[in-house]
Image (tube, rainbow, N blue to C red):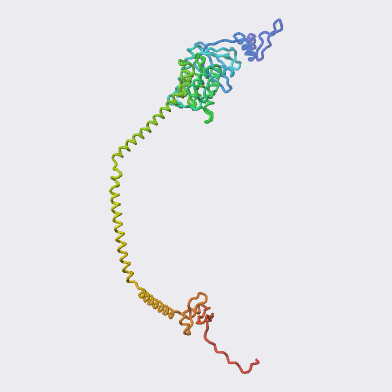
Amino acid sequence: MADPQSDVLFDAAARLLADSAPDDNAGAPVNSVMGVGELANKLKRVVENEFGHVRLRGEISGYKRVASGHAYLSLKDENAVIDGVIWKGNVAQLGFTPQDGAEVIATGKVTTYPGRSKYQIVIDRMELAGEGALMALLEKLKAKLAAEGLFAAAAKKRLPFLPTRIGVVTSPTGAVIRDILHRLEDRCPSHVLVWPVKVQGAGSAAEVAAAVRGFDAMPPETRPDLVIVARGGGSIEDLWSFNEEVVVRAIAACSIPIISAVGHETDTTLADFAADLRAPTPTAAAEMAVPVLADLRLTLAGYGQRTEKCARRYHQRGRERLDALVRVLPRRDALLGPQRQRADDLGARLDRGLERRVTVARGQLDRSGAALRLSTLERQLERAKDRVAATWRLVESLGPNAILDRGYAFVSARSSGAVVGSAEAARAAGAVTLHFRDGEVDAKVERSGPKAYAAPKPDQPILL
């Protein structure tokens, strides 16, 4: 038999469906059931109404900026940790780049995130917690960039001696640009390109970095030969834009030599370490950028005078050496005297030789003329004519025409005109020409075989 009390306990524990809650006197249900989202929204309203905006001091941990532009981080101290979020618009308004380990004071609204059942702070503004925290952040960033080699002396570029164009990255309304222009005008007037930027406050670091990269990206015909990044003096908070990582990396990556002239002589920023040269003031940067035109002219004039003195010295030394050589050289009369005397002697000998030659030739002519008589010449001429006539008669007797006069003839080939000397040559020529004393006769050579006897002719024709 079952126990009634146990049945009651079993029913209470094993009930599958919840009973509706009893109503109160006003008709509202007591201990009504809420959804999870409803509870989360109520908690969110309670937390936001209770705390509103607060200021929290803590150390940044796990800072991360996502692709959407929002940033997520945690603020912690020795007792607790709270998550935080910075929306994209507020991230751009921060005066520095948050880094892990930096102690800050964050101002924002405490709320909950129902998606993860956790509370967090939506940060609207963030500042470093005192100058000590600021310097600690600065030293940490400096050590990081130095380890990457951004401050290495080997990476520094030499400044041009006389730049044609000078780019200036600074505020267009401050006294800095006027001081730089006035100093350049006094020392050496140059073509100045000003890239106006904000040098303090939210977004100033991005503008300075963009200006440096913009000068570097210019085409070679318009790009400046030197860039000056300048700002007047101020507190470390005012100069913090030039300690930002984006500015330091832009200066270190620039292919144009850069002079950093940020603050006064006692102010030091990370941009000074990344630049190729640091100037204590903007005015000093202008003095470093260009030489003094008057000094340059004086130097050029000095070089010209030294060059002229050197040229004159060479000329003077050459004249001295020439004079010394002239003194040791023999005189003209000493060199040419013997030659002149020899020429006179040869001239006199030539005259005597010509006279003797003429005398000898005249004697030979006289002797030859005495041997020459007209009768002798006439006899020699007659003997020569007789020899020529005899020779011509012999030539005529041996010629072929003489044979023709005696009744003979000779044969020549008609085609070539060559004399035919044999029967075989005549048969080979075919057509020949017979040459007689009184003319020529053309003939044709025919081949003849053995002569055939003719048949006897019958007295009376045969009918059959």
Q: In the picture shown, does residue 260 fall above or below 362?
A: above
Q: Which of 91 and 334 lies nearest the eye of the viewer?
A: 334
Which residue is at 52% across, 84% downward?
449
How many badges with numbers are in the image?
A: 0
Q: Is residue 120 visible?
A: no
Q: x, y (%) of residue 128?
A: 51, 13
Q: x, y (%) of residue 172?
A: 55, 19
Q: In the picture shown, does residue 88 fall above or below 443?
A: above
Which residue is at 31% across, 39% downward?
326
Q: Which of 364 and 168 lies nearest the eye of the viewer?
A: 364
Q: x, y (%) of residue 62?
A: 52, 18
Picture quarter with the C terminus: bottom right
Q: x, y (%) of residue 262?
A: 49, 18
Seen from this angle, which residue lies furthest bottom? 459
Seen from this angle, which residue lies furthest top? 25
Which residue is at 54% across, 23% downward?
194
Q: Which of 89 and 151 lies nearest the eye of the viewer?
A: 151
Q: In the picture shown, does residue 332 fall above or below 212?
A: below
Which residue is at 30% across, 61% downward?
357
Picture quarter with the N terminus: top right
